[in-house]
Amino acid sequence: MRVVHVNQTDNRGGAGRAAFRIHTALRNSGVESFMAVNEASSGGWSVDAPRGRLARATARIRPHLGLAVSRLQKSRAPGLHSPAIIPGGLRQRLAARGADIAHLHWVNAEMVSVAEIGRLGLPVVWTLHDMWPFCGAEHYTTADRWRTGYGPGSRVGGGPVDLDAWVWRRKKRHWTRPMQIVTPSLWLAQCVAESDLMAGWPVTVIPNAIDTDIWCPVERTVARGILGLPQDRPIVMFGAMGGTEDPRKGGDLLFAALGKLALSGLDADLLIVGEVAPQAPPDLGFPVHYLGHLSDDVALRLAYAAADAFVLPSRLDNLPNTGVEALASGRPVIGFDTGGLPDIITHETNGYLARAFDVDDLARGIGWVLGLGEGWKRVSVAARTHAEETFAGDRIAGRYAALYASILGEAAT
């Protein structure tokens, strides 16, 4: 059984880190697993990236070409859009590795084209890290076009071309044979089942993996000492790619909740990872510590360990790595009851699941965790236990290996 994981990056970005962790867990369990990426940063011998000056330059240019196509639409629809029109020679790369199964992940940034995915010529497993595979060009959307089939009356945004509908029609035309879909969250699996494009396709829910031997609790006083954070104050952590700038990640909702807590007299510090201090930091009523972009796991582990709670105020998310990392680090997680967050948070057991987008309830959840006193240890242990029982790498690798074996057995018959 030889599996090749296909992702734009390895070990960088949310999807890249998730794909690399699955790949590593499979190799640790004895599966012949490899990665085909356009941008490699891990340095691993089992990861194939474009070689040669021209190939590397082409890989760097591809994302800009896709963005240029999106901008031509002059769309007012928010968020990232990927047209996937440029072939990337994926079939040849898979053949060079002798792949039995192509395991797709986040294949955007013009890594492959829609048509290319439909003619790979071998069994496909596709782990979804966002909504793009069953949408048009959108990666996340609150519109229902993916349910109803992208008719002209449902268009979102302006511009001369309905890019989302055009991409969706290309998917419908080229993806004529169902692929095995894997979703890390129950929410995304339900979306697949309700989508016009993938309804009836096989869907399996397998969470993202994490190495619980590496991601484990660290003494809080030690972590704070290394990071130069105060020892005598509660600390709430927020972290996301792009920090507070991405509306989908809900930084504004967290700030509103913290404002309410400040008025109530709660005294705590906020730790922000993924963003450097802005020129004019907002006055939140709390001291704020900005750690910037942390690219290595050691620094991230220390950040989680320094906090008393991790807040995930996302408006829409699949199964964010940050939530899984926080649990493995023994830190309670607070978030909204939306998307894949209920797969991470068990209400008032390993964290607090607030009513969707209810700022008052989010504030109540932060106050609940910080006010636990000796009960905090119980919630911390529950967080760690949930990570070990649900997301541990050996468990996830076993589930994927069984899925591969089932697919190859069906293909042989």
Image (spheres, helix red, strand yellow):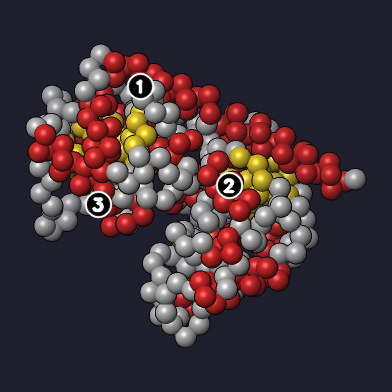
Quadrant holding the C terminus? top right
Q: Is residue 361 left or right of residue 103?
A: left
The residue wearing badge 1 is 380
Q: Considering only order in the chain, which callout, 3 or 1, is on the residue closer to the N terminus?
A: 3
Q: Is residue 47 visible?
A: no
Q: Which amino acid lies under the numbered mark 2 shown in the image of this protein?
A: Gln
Which residue is at a point 59% across and 46% down the rendered structure image?
Answer: 189
Vertical relation: 129 (above or below) 393 = below
Q: Nearer the viewer, residue 339 or 397?
A: 339
User: x%, y% of residue 214?
Assistant: 44, 29
Disc 1 versus disc 3: nearer the observer = 3
Q: Amino acid at mark 1?
A: Ser
Which label number is shown at residue 252? 3
Question: Vertically, is 124 above or below 22?
Answer: below
Please state the horizontal and vertical placement of residue 158, each as a whole percent of the image.
42, 79
**CB-based contact (under 8 Å), mark 2 and mark 3:** no
Quadrant position of the N terminus in the picture: top right
In this view, the mark in front (2 or 3): 2
User: Crowding near pointer 3: few (<14 within 10 Å), some, many (20+)?
Assistant: some
Residue bearing the label numbered 2? 190
